[in-house]
Image (cartoon, grey):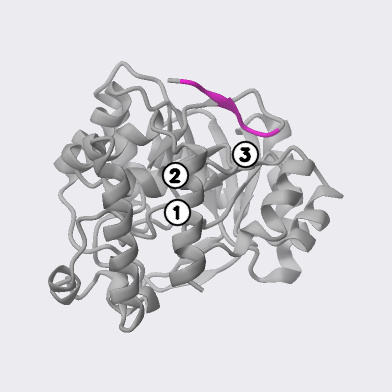
Amino acid sequence: MEKKRLGNSDLELTPLGFGAWAIGGGDWQFAWGPQDDNDSVAAIHKALDLGINWIDTAAVYGLGHSEEVVARALKTTSQKPYVFTKCGLVWDEKREVTNGLKEVRREVEDSLRRLQVEVIDLYQMHWPKPDEDVEEAWSVMADLKKEGKVRWIGVSNFNVSQMERAMKIAPITSNQPPYSMLNRAVEAEILPFCAKNNIGTINYAPMHSGLLTGAMTKERVANFPKDDFRRNAKNYQEPLLSRNLAVAEFLGKIGARHGVSAGVVAIAWTLHNSAVTAAIVGGRNAKQVEGTIPAATFRLSEGEYAEVQGYLSEHVS
């Protein structure tokens, strides 16, 4: 599996990383519904066994639980992947989540404890909110790097002006934005800026939270658990839902030519952009991981990429 260096770091990443949002489980504000921890551990083990060399999680996923599950999985495998996590979304005793950048030093200590590691390979600011606290928080993150608690520091969901402000304090190794066929906002300014400034891009939601997997249906959406955040997401509501499922059906036809799923084509489409270092792909069980792993090596031909672009320009505004 070919690897690509992440920005200004020494991290050589496989094209896919294991995304650990959904394995945080249910019972919190942005959950994906109930999740079995044994399935989560099996999914991580499968990803590592198939060659994936990095895991992306966050303190807020499951309110600390995702990090704990990652630690459990890593204790029971000989593989030593890079471990990335994030700060900046905090919660209280009522399990209510808010944006906050005043407790970065406490957050990193909590993440180190939950992950059971001595150093975090990439520590990311999850959201630039509140905006006025970005510089102070980034300065703390730069200090954590100097102290050896984290190896590299990155941002997530930052726009160009926010990255420019942070760069005056310390270099940015990476930005983690959402990027999929259904969310192309970063193409205009953010991806070119990152490429120009040697800031690696690890995009999340390349299959748009499951919509482009080819396995999503209207019936499945209608039966989402009450604590699945996607129930209220706009792209899962009509009229966008029907449009999006049609996109997935189109991708499935391209994938069928190569024996891969619509989701693999969706991921490969994001990796076609040279500004993208690697894509974050979640997996809730080993079977899901096996279904998406072909995206680590599958690439769209220029003709197929043009075919997809033509479809998107006609059907997705």
Along the line of sight, the residue nearer the viewer: 204 or 95: 204
Nearer the N terminus, badge 1 or badge 3? 3
Residue 162: quarter of image: bottom right
Residue 132 location in percent, x, y? 75, 70
Along the line of sight, the residue nearer the viewer: 78 or 246: 246
Q: Circle 3 — which element?
A: loop
Dot 1 surroundings within 10 Å: few (below 14), some, or many (20 or more)? Answer: many
For label 3, the residue is 274
- Left or right, 25 with respect to 122, comes to left
- Compared to residue 99, the image places residue 61 above or below, namely above
Whether the magenta-drawn stretch holds residue 177 is answered as no
For label 1, the residue is 308
For label 2, the residue is 304
What kind of residue is marked 2? Glu
- Left or right, 11 with respect to 133, comes to left
- Residue found 76% across the figure and 50% down from its top: 193
Determine the CA span between mark 3 and mark 2: 16 Å
**Residue 90 image label:** none
Give the residues in magenta.
2-7
Q: Circle 1 — which element?
A: helix
Dominant secondary structure (helix, strand or loop) of the stretch shown in magenta: loop
- Left or right, 188 with respect to 264, comes to right
- Residue found 30% across the figure and 75% down from its top: 241
Dot 3 surroundings within 10 Å: few (below 14), some, or many (20 or more)? Answer: few
- Residue found 73% across the figure and 32% down from its top: 146
Residue 224 location in percent, x, y? 18, 71
